Amino acid sequence: QTGLNMPPPPPPIAQYFVAVNGQQTGPFDLGQLRSMANFQQLNRQTMVWKNGMANWDTAEKQPELSRLFASMPPPLPPL
């Protein structure tokens, strides 16, 4: 009869792997990714992957991550 008064498990924390210089790094949670974005280590075009995704894709296409870039200007166009 144990477990009847147990709280529900916390929702799974999204953890993304990030491609850095062609190498897979991570996993990182959203707090770590926010810090990486603040230090320009993560941008809209950074390739990311998390469990459940079929393929690697850009960070800007992930709803959870696109919020990290809401206050950042887009990249400068090439000269």
Image (cartoon, helix red, strand yellow):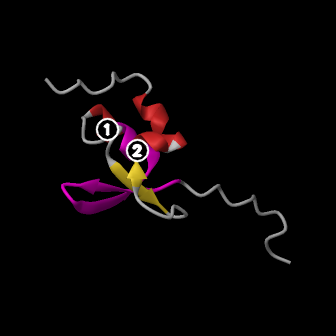
Residue 22, how many percent across, how many down?
A: 21, 59
Label 2: few (<14), some or many (≥20) within 10 Å? many
Q: Residue furthest bottom?
A: 1
Indicate the secondary structure of the residue bearing disc 2.
Answer: helix
Question: Along the line of sight, which residue is nearer the eye, 59 or 29?
Answer: 59
Residue 22, placed above or below residue 33? below
Residue 26, placed above or below residue 44? below
Mark 1 or 2 closer to N-term?
Answer: 1
Residue hosting label 1: 43
Query: Is 18 on the left-hand or right-hand side of 62?
Result: left
Residue hosting label 2: 59
Q: Which image quadrant: the N terminus?
A: bottom right
User: Is 15 within the magenta?
Assistant: yes
Q: Which image quadrant: the C terminus?
A: top left
Residue ID at (25%, 34%) = 39
* Amino acid at circle 2: Ala
Query: Is 18 on the left-hand or right-hand side of 8?
Result: left
Counting every numbered tag in the picture gives 2
Question: Along the line of sight, which residue is nearer the eye, 20 or 8?
Answer: 20
Start and end of the magenta stretch? 14-34
Question: Along the line of sight, which residue is nearer the eye, 55 or 38?
Answer: 55
Residue ID at (44%, 62%) = 55
* Amino acid at circle 1: Asn
C-beta proximity under 8 Å, tags 1 and 2: yes
User: Is 27 within the magenta?
Assistant: yes
Real-space Cα distance between discs 1 and 2?
7 Å
Residue 18, how many percent across, how many down?
A: 33, 55
